[in-house]
Image: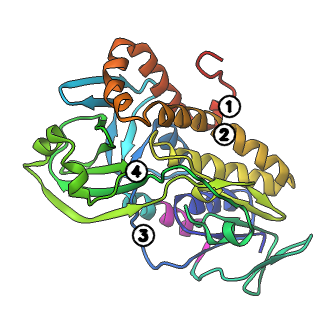
Amino acid sequence: MDLLVVGAGPAGLATALHAARAGLDVAVWEQRAGIVDKACGEGLMPGAVAALAALGVHPTGRDLHGIRYVAGPRQVDAGFRAGPGRGVRRTTLHTALREAVLAAGVRVERRTARRVGQDENAVWVDGARAGHLVAADGLHSPIRRALGLDRPHRGRPRHGLRRHYRIAPWSDHVEVHWARHAEAYVTPVADDLVGVAVLTTARGSFDDHLFAFPGLRERLAGGAPAGPVRGAGPLRQDVGARTAGRVLLVGDAAGYVDALTGEGIALALAQAQAAVRAVTGGDLAGYEREWRRLTRRYRWLTHALLGATRAPPARTALVPLVQRAPWLFRAGVDALASPAGRRGRERLPGG
């Protein structure tokens, strides 16, 4: 085969779709059976909605028209000028992408990649030969680790917890509620369902962390929890390179700063397309350059926001600050909402 993709999350399935469109013989391996749920915020930025539509994938959900920051009685909004985003259940997104991949004639097998070897002509995975390998096997990618591409990070680890509530959404925005030690992201995903994701460096259960958001708890009081709490982390993953020989890393496997800005799916879709271009063009070194270009703004904004809100007093002051400078908040949201492929050509604020 021309390309083997390990990992059937959104990054891997999008890579397979782009590869099939490019005329490559491609297969996908995934160790888990069926449709896979995962702890994520479930809000697709407008750029992600557009990238999925270009692939012929239109997952159902709730239109999102902006982002709202909330701290107690204070709040500030910024609308999406690039068109609506969409709140989509992770399982709904996975189903839509998997159906598109199967319709394109791509083989999806339940297999675990255990041994990876390569030479100048091919990659060998458990005896299967492929021209190239895309590792889209997640935040804690076993293939990335086996290739020696992990890099240590000494900062305090951040983790995410997500639970759904059976309640009608009260907003068409993603709400980000700020407390001294955590943020809570509220995303409408259906007419009777919202997802609440908490990001924090502190230990504790989901309910422990939710206690820091009395206004949000009051909103959720009329709804019942729907499904289990799911967790993910540590979120920060430092990676030495995105390629090793004929292997390319895509999505969370390629490195991750934080879920703070909600761009994970949009970036994964852009990386998937770039990886296939690198394979078909015979320019794997170009993928590293393209990855850096595609993710530059995400990395800059996320590092800046994490640094600015590391101390609890700064977190408390954030929403009052952006209330006084709403233009700055709108500029940041516009940057997040723009299609990932165009970000690297734009100037950073003040740059």
Q: Earlier in the sequence, mark 3 or mark 4?
A: 3
Disc 3 is placed on an element classified as loop
User: Which one is closest to the eye, mark 4 or mark 1?
Assistant: 4
Q: Which residue is mark 3?
A: 36
User: Which one is closest to the eye, mark 4 or mark 2?
Assistant: 4
Q: Earlier in the sequence, mark 4 or mark 1?
A: 4
In the rendered structure, which segment of residues is drawn in magenta? 97-108
How crowded is the residue under tag 3: few (<14 C-alpha within 10 Å), some, or many (20+)? some
- Residue type (three-letter) at the residue carrying disc 2: Leu
Quarter of the picture holding the C terminus: top right
Q: Which residue is mark 2?
A: 294
* Residue 41 as seen in the image, left or right of residue 233: left
- In space, the residues marked 3 and 4 are separated at their CA atoms by 26 Å
Q: Which residue is mark 1?
A: 344
Taking depth in this image into account, of 300 and 135 the one nearest to the observer is 300
- In space, the residues marked 1 and 2 are separated at their CA atoms by 6 Å
Whole-percent x, y for residue 216 in the image:
18, 41
Q: Quadrant of residue 124?
A: bottom right
Taking depth in this image into account, of 247 and 18 the one nearest to the observer is 247
How crowded is the residue under tag 2: few (<14 C-alpha within 10 Å), some, or many (20+)? many
Disc 1 is placed on an element classified as loop
* Cβ–Cβ under 8 Å for marks 3 and 2: no
Q: Which residue is mark 4?
A: 201
- On whether residue 151 falls in the magenta region, the answer is no
Quarter of the picture holding the N terminus: bottom right
Q: Earlier in the sequence, mark 3 or mark 2?
A: 3
Whole-percent x, y for residue 128 in the image:
75, 83
